[in-house]
Image (tube, rainbow, N blue to C red):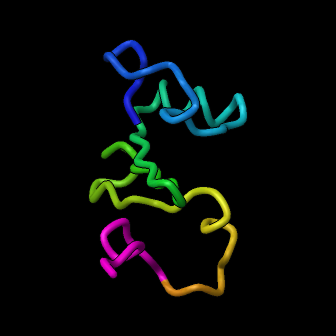
Amino acid sequence: MRHWSHGGPSDLSNGVLLCTRCHHRIHDDGWQVHATPTEVWFTPPASIDPKRTPRPGGKTALHVDLPPRTPTTANPPH
């Protein structure tokens, strides 16, 4: 994900659906977004999490019975 004001394309391949509140939190609080073709990860600013641990978004965030995952283990090579 690359914000359009930093040279990123303004198209669907460089976007994530967010509600208005979350959209503003991303920009105002300094969150980072990493998206793969199948998953979205949100990295909080150090003021929220000093370790800046990525957090899953989308459907993955709603499955509380799954073991914890990280961006590096989410899509192991085949």
Point out residue 62 in the picture as x, y percentages from the top left corner. 69, 68
Does residue 77 show up magenta in the picture? yes
Name the residue rendered at 34%, 78% in the picture.
76
Q: Residue furthest front?
A: 78
Name the residue rendered at 30%, 77% in the picture.
77
On-image quarter of the N terminus: top left
Q: Main secondary structure of the magenta part?
A: loop
Residue 56 drawn above or below residue 19: below
For the residue pair 9 and 18, the one nearer the viewer reads as 9
Residue 65 drawn above or below residue 14: below
Residue 16 drawn above or below residue 9: below
The answer to which image quadrant residue 57 occupies is: bottom right
Point out residue 13 in the picture as x, y percentages from the top left corner. 51, 35
Q: Which residues are magenta?
A: 68-78
Does residue 73 show up magenta in the picture? yes
Point out residue 41 in the picture as x, y percentages from the top left corner. 46, 55
Name the residue rendered at 67%, 76% in the picture.
63
Point out residue 74 in the picture as x, y percentages from the top left corner. 41, 73
Name the residue rendered at 72%, 35% in the picture.
19
For the residue pair 48 and 5, the one nearer the viewer reads as 5
For the residue pair 78 and 31, the one nearer the viewer reads as 78
On-image quarter of the C terminus: bottom left
